[in-house]
Amino acid sequence: MANEDYVEGGIETSESYSYWRKVFQRLKKHKIAMVSLWFLVVLILMAVFAGPLSFGNNPYSYIKSVPWAPRPELAPPGPGHPLGLDNMGRDAWSRLLYGGRVSLAVGFICSFIGAAVGLFFGLISGYFGGITDMLIMRFTDFMLSLPVLPLMVVLSSVIKGSLWTIIFVISIFSWMGVARLVRGEVLSLKEQEFTEAARAIGETPGRIMWIHLLPNSMAPVIVAATLAISGNIIYEATLSFLGLGIRQPTPSWGNMLNGAQTFMLTAPWLMWWPGIAILVTTLAFNFLGDGLRDALDPRLYR
Amino acid sequence: MRNYLIRRSLELIPVLFAIAFVSFWLVSKMGDPFAVLVLNPHVRPEDIQRLRHIWHWDDPLVVRFWYWLKDFVWPRQGWGLSTLAPGQTALQLISRRIPVTIAFSSTSLIAAIILSIPLGVYSALRQYSVADYILTFFAFFGMSMPTFWFGIMLIYLFAVKLHWFPAAGYHRAFFIIKGVPVMFDKAPRWMQFLDEAWHLTLPITVLTVFQVGGWLRYMRSSMLEVKSMDYVRTARAKGLPERTVIYKHAFRNAVIPIITLIGLSFPGLIGGAMITETVFAIDGIGRLTYNAVMSQDVFVAMALIMIFSILVVIGNFLADIFYAVADPRIRYS
């Protein structure tokens, strides 16, 4: 039994290996996507090494005085504090770095949860059909006919709290697209010979879904999940901007902009960098997703 | 077709019912709408009890929901009292604020359609040209831009630095006509209109850019797909002029999915309007939603969520119907 598994697994990995290598080669030709990919790698590294990169400052502590400004609150950029200090006298550069950690984490985790839940519902719905399919798809349609942002605002005001609350609130609304996509894929995949063959040798539905249908419907899911990251980062930023997402003193790109409108006249530099950070990050994820779509789409394969 | 319409509209009822229940349950978790009254020395505890009883707030959730829904459909008690604006019912508050939101979001919706469809077609017809690259970049920019930050930046540039447009609000309080102050409501219609247009230019820009990006990309790819279809080649082979081929044969088919997409984009439009109104301090129902949630004005928040849900459901419905009408290949029975 173990031996059989090994052989079967071996063939699959070598096949999928060459498939993914082809995909990567096609992706490499997509210049903007590659630039975005490298940019995102740098960005993630910056978020990971936020501590050493913040010049000995930390995002939480109040800086008592700076030589170039009468008060540390809203002090303009200067030596050691490249982006100045925020309204609470905290170093904006280190808050930007640590905020990136939070924003990227929310983007990735929500997208992952959304993809996983969407895959689960999509596989079950597409494979079993009938009443299961009808119930799941009705539920998906129901979720799609909700006014997302107002409900997110209500939800996050009801369950106030931590990073995980906001992840939960965003994830609830981020699985429907993937579920529909996967269901569509599975509907066509399950009519193909390899699924029939798997059924003929007596494999269980769970195993067919896991081994045969899941890897084959992965391509559009990866594209959708990549694109969803940028949407989720914007959702997090929006909720935090409205004062309902990540709470002080934890920094996030969104809540750094929370008070920015008030300080627009006195400290406009405070509202530039978090916004630019959100914009370039979402732009990069969108370009990468677009490049991945071109690379993964067999219809465009030349 | 008629049967399909009837069946489809009947299907809306359970969906709306479910949405109503879920949002009622969720919003009532926000707080007790009568708790604020306790703080008011002019309201006697008996009166609070009486109000609570009128709204069946002393009954279980389902009963409470039923009476609320009845009042929402047939507003005898005006959808409940607002705590945000004491002395007003939610219905009064909302109906006074709804016209602004409708005016400004429908203007930006139309602007977005007028911009994205021709630009998408142009981009597709000149694939890989400089114009195509510029439009593509612009589209990605629009898709990636966080709405609220774009709003703030526009305020900073055009209101704070250049003084071209006002930073907040949707009309001025009064005009000075020949040295005499005239209240906004008493001013001539054209002055009111111009003033509102001037105030709403930046918010409409923000909301439009937010929508154009995605639609432009979608229109482009739809047009590209149709362009390589056999029937387009056939039309060309028949010797039809290029204009006819593009606009009669290709465009008409390419635009169908976009119109469906527009119907499905209502949740985004509502969210965008909510953020834009909050950033630009426009007293529409989007900002009202935010304020109601922040100050735990339960009845107002409930009614607003319900209105938004109805709008989204209608958008989906229209998209479906349109798709069925426009595409003769789809037969519903």
Image: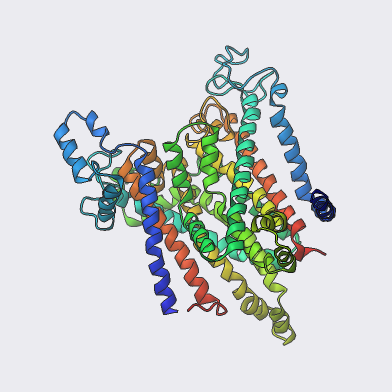
Q: Is residue A81 visible?
A: yes
Figure quadrant of residue B133: bottom right
Rendering colour mode? rainbow
Quick check: B100 above or below B244?
above
Q: Which residue corresponds to the image point at 40% horizontal and 52% vertical from the top-left?
A: B101
Furthest residue to the front? A1
Location of residue A8 in the rendering, given as x and y in whole percent from the top left corner:
81, 55
Residue drawn at x 75%, y 49% is A33
Q: Which one is in front, B4 or A92? A: B4
Residue B126 picture location, percent across and down: 73, 66
Total marks shown come to: 0
Task: Choose between A214 and B82: the one closer to the eye.
Answer: A214
Vertical arrangement, residue A51 with respect to residue A114, above or below: above
Q: Nearer the viewer, residue A188 or B30?
A: A188
- Picture coordinates of residue A30, whole percent (x, y): 79, 53
Query: Is residue A179 shown above or below B33?
Result: below
Q: Position of residue A114 (x, y in %)?
A: 59, 48
